[in-house]
Amino acid sequence: MRGLLSFAVEPTLNRYDRPWTFDYYRRLRDRVKAMPGIEAETLAMIPVLQDNEWDNWVTIEGYTPKQGETPDPHMQYCSTGFFAALKIPILLGRDFTLKDAVGAPKVGIVNQKLAHRYFGGANPLGRHVGMGIDPGTKMDIEIVGVAGDTKYENMSEEVPYELYIPYAQLDFVNGMTVYLRAHGDPTNAFNTIRRVVREVDPVVPMYDLRTLDNQIEISLFTQRLLATLSSVFGGIATLLAALGLYGVMAFMVARRTREIGIRMALGAATGSVVWMVMREVLLVAAIGVLIGTGAAWAATRLIQAQLFGIKATDLATMTAAALGIVVVSAVSGYFPARRATTVDPVRALRWE
């Protein structure tokens, strides 16, 4: 997404006229394409990673839905150059062209996930889909390509089934998001973009000018906030656990001072006394780790949707957390045990 920026325009707020609106988009693309440093440009009706969603029930040639199943892929209506600008690979077939306009045979591109789900290992090219699920739905959209899978609503949602349609074949018009891929820092082009949009038509509103890096940051804000809060509360919980364990062990060692004194008087080595106490500490820690790991594993389904980039059952993370608890427990038990061995055996024998 580096070097990619976007902004939205709404020509239909001032004039709902299909030929004029399509001509406006053509003039806008021509102007931004001529800007220095612009590598690629395109239009999309559904802005990516902004929690927007457009589903549509579809009928798929050769696929019979199961009982209660309704194929409803996420839709994207876009212009030529969309896949190149967003660097989405075309894995099979072709991209949209200028010939895919009103009057030409209707075409569509599906993502890899949809192709695998509804066509299995068969070649989806040449198959048809239709908008709607009513009996007799006309399947007049030919699949001409398969694109790579991408995120749609936000970074934390799973990749959806997706169907791309050229907006030039639509019988209605709508506001669009313009995507530009620029060389260098894309923020340097912000002022030029504002000027160019005003020159194309000063009455058409423009808004949400931002880089895609910034949009990703916004999309991940909740997850990062939760991660930060979880880290803070986890650190506090670990500190409280360490203090509590230290207090419990100090109390236990204090109650066994007489026993320790007798052992020391009979010639017990310092190391053996410390290990006697540490065995109990490590046993308690092991029991706690086993119970905690089991509970954490069972609770992973509750937090799976809040995670991005890692699995809820990440073995390395759980192992690190378990080792951390063991280390904290060992340190919390070692110092009281070590201090008890420094007590004079005579004083320990008199301890009540």
Image (cartoon, grey):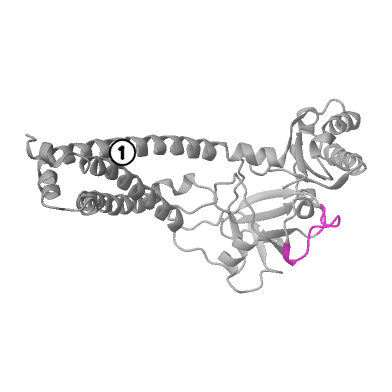
- 343 on left or right of 32: left
How far across and how far down the image is residue 240, in percent?
A: 32, 35
Residue underneath mark 1:
241
Query: Residue pushed farthest bottom?
Result: 122
Q: Residue at x 76, y 40 (%)?
A: 5
Foreground pick, 215 / 198: 215
How far across and how far down the image is residue 318, in percent?
A: 40, 53
How far across and how far down the image is residue 346, in percent?
A: 11, 39
How far across and how far down the image is residue 276, in percent?
A: 19, 52
Range of residues picked out in magenta: 90-104
Asked if residue 60 can be seen in this view, the reply is: no
Q: Residue at x 87, y 42 (%)?
A: 29
> In which quarter of the view is residue 59 placed?
bottom right
Which amino acid type corresponds to the residue marked 1 in the rendered image? Answer: Ala
Foreground pick, 278 / 131: 278
- 110 on left or right of 189: left
- 246 on left or right of 86: left
Query: Residue pushed farthest top?
Result: 203
Q: In this view, does 311 lie above or below 343?
A: below
Q: Magenta span: helix, strand or loop, mainly?
A: loop
Quadrant location, the C terminus = top left
Residue 343 falls within the magenta-colored stretch: no
- 249 on left or right of 314: left
Asked if residue 140 can be seen in this view, the reply is: yes
Foreground pick, 317 / 91: 317
Foreground pick, 335 / 37: 335
Helix, strand or loop at disc 1? helix
Residue 99 falls within the magenta-colored stretch: yes
